């Protein structure tokens, strides 16, 4: 088999860590190739140099022995599927033995090892992910992945319905990859297969769906793909969301400078706290993610465009800057062109330094006050005064206020 294209080796390919791993794997003269995202991304605007995948005909036990001999740390992270992780100079490399799927279960496959590069490429999901690259820069493209990548066509390897039956997560990956690499309408065969197989998503774990959805929402412009998923009946099998993406589109515009926040984008598809809580449970979000998602869809009524500076400070102090920024950004996205005031409040909330009451219970005890619930009441009274003064009083002023309040109580 001849290579289909040759490229000049990229910096990540010639990095010392990569060279060391390649040399170890080639010690017995074996052919190895880079595969997966590092190849695809190197052809599509560049690769950052993380998550480097390598394929080899050698069995896992041979790979381990080669790394041990070369003094390279290795971990049997996916031994059941032929994967070893090597660590060189802090860089992680996943080395997987060439394989074929023997029996698929919709979530994973039983595999057998092979030394046939074409068989290994045939088991991959999309043509752009079936590319392989030698350390010298030769690219092998048995399924037309380069052409599809350049055309922005996310196309399944072989029959789309069969690929989805083998691993149901590929249905979501189809939309996620279209959000990142697609141009125009999705591949017709892929969309038809995804639409027909939408119910299969109910067989997947929430964690797997969560990971794909958040990666999809991290794309530069996921709104069109979300709309396609909704029209195809796919989105409704995952989350109960609104029927439009207007807030998401506004959010994308606001985030153009600061970068995408996938969880906030997910929240933009919710309409209330109840739906957010349902989605959080379905996607098995962490406790922190669940709390944030629910909070984003239940802002207090005091959060509005009429906030002045002092009121904004009070809200930030009460709820925290992160939560306030979430509410304000979503409000700005929802109001669109009329959200200019919210955008001003966003910047003001980010700029205001966190305020901490400058006195504590120990200060009350140092003044000779008896331990007990009265101290808590006095501190709350000082805090209320401090807040009303826009957090300006110093520690000395707060101590004076504490003394005066304590004296008034004695009298």
Image (cartoon, rainbow, N blue to C red):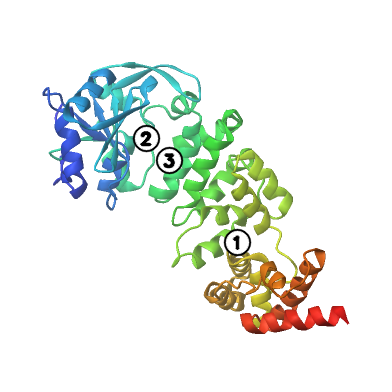
Judged from this view, the residue extending furthest toward the front is 368
Compared across the picture, whether 159 is left or right of 43 comes to: right
Q: Is residue 308 visible?
A: no
Residue 286 in picture, x, y percent from top left:
59, 44
Q: Is residue 216 above or below residue 197?
A: below
Residue position for label 1: 247
| Secondary structure state at the residue bearing disc 2 | loop
Q: Is residue 116 above or below residue 268?
A: above
- Nearer to me, 241 or 389: 389
| Secondary structure state at the residue bearing disc 1 | helix
Compared across the picture, whether 78 is left or right of 141 comes to: right
Q: Of the residues tagged 2 and 3, which is closer to the observer?
A: 2
Residue at 48%, 28% (x, y): give it.
Answer: 164
Q: CA distance from mark 2 to mark 3?
A: 11 Å
Residue position for label 2: 126
Which mark is first along the chain, 3 or 1? 3
Which mark is first along the chain, 3 or 2? 2
Residue at 69%, 47% (x, y): give it.
Answer: 277
Compared across the picture, whether 34 is left or right of 309 comes to: left
Q: CA distance from mark 1 to mark 2?
A: 31 Å
| Secondary structure state at the residue bearing disc 3 | loop
Q: Are marks 2 and 3 in contact (CB under 8 Å)?
A: no
């Amino acid at each position: 088999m001849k290579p289909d294209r040759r490229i000049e080796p990229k910096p990540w390919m010639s990095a010392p860590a990569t060279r060391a791993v390649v040399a170890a794997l080639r010690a017995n003269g074996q052919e190895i190739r880079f595969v997966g995202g590092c190849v695809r991304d190197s052809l599509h605007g560049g690769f950052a140099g993380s998550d480097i995948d390598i394929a080899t005909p050698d069995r896992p036990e041979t790979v381990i022995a080669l790394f041990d001999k070369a003094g390279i740390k290795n971990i049997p992270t996916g031994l059941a599927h032929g994967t070893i992780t090597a660590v060189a100079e802090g860089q992680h490399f996943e080395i997987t033995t060439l394989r074929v799927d023997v029996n698929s279960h919709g979530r994973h496959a039983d595999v057998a090892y092979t030394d046939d590069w074409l068989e290994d490429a045939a088991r991959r999901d999309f043509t752009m992910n079936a590319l392989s690259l030698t350390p010298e820069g030769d690219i092998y493209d048995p399924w037309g992945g380069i052409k599809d990548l350049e055309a922005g066509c996310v196309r399944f390897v072989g029959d789309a319905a069969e690929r989805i039956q083998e691993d149901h997560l590929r249905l979501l990956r189809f939309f996620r990859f279209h959000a990142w690499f697609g141009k125009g309408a999705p591949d017709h065969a892929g969309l038809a297969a995804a639409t027909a197989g939408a119910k299969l998503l109910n067989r997947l774990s929430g964690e797997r769906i969560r990971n794909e959805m958040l990666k999809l929402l991290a794309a530069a412009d996921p709104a069109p793909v979300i709309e396609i998923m909704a029209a195809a009946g796919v989105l409704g099998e995952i989350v109960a969301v609104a029927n439009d993406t207007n807030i998401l589109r506004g959010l994308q515009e606001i985030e153009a400078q600061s970068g995408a926040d996938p969880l906030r984008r997910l929240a933009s598809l919710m309409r209330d706290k109840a739906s957010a809580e349902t989605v959080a449970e379905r996607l098995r979000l962490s406790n922190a993610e669940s709390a944030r998602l629910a909070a984003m869809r239940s802002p207090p009524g005091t959060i509005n465009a009429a906030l002045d500076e002092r009121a904004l400070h009070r809200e930030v102090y009460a709820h925290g800057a992160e939560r306030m920024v979430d509410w304000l950004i979503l409000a700005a996205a929802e109001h669109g062109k009329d959200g200019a005031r919210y955008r001003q409040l966003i910047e003001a909330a980010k700029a205001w330094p966190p305020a901490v009451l400058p006195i504590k219970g120990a200060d009350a005890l140092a003044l000779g006050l008896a331990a007990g619930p009265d101290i808590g009441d006095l501190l709350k009274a000082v805090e209320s005064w401090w807040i009303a003064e826009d957090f300006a009083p110093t520690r000395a002023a707060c101590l004076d206020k504490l003394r005066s309040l304590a004296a008034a109580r004695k009298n």
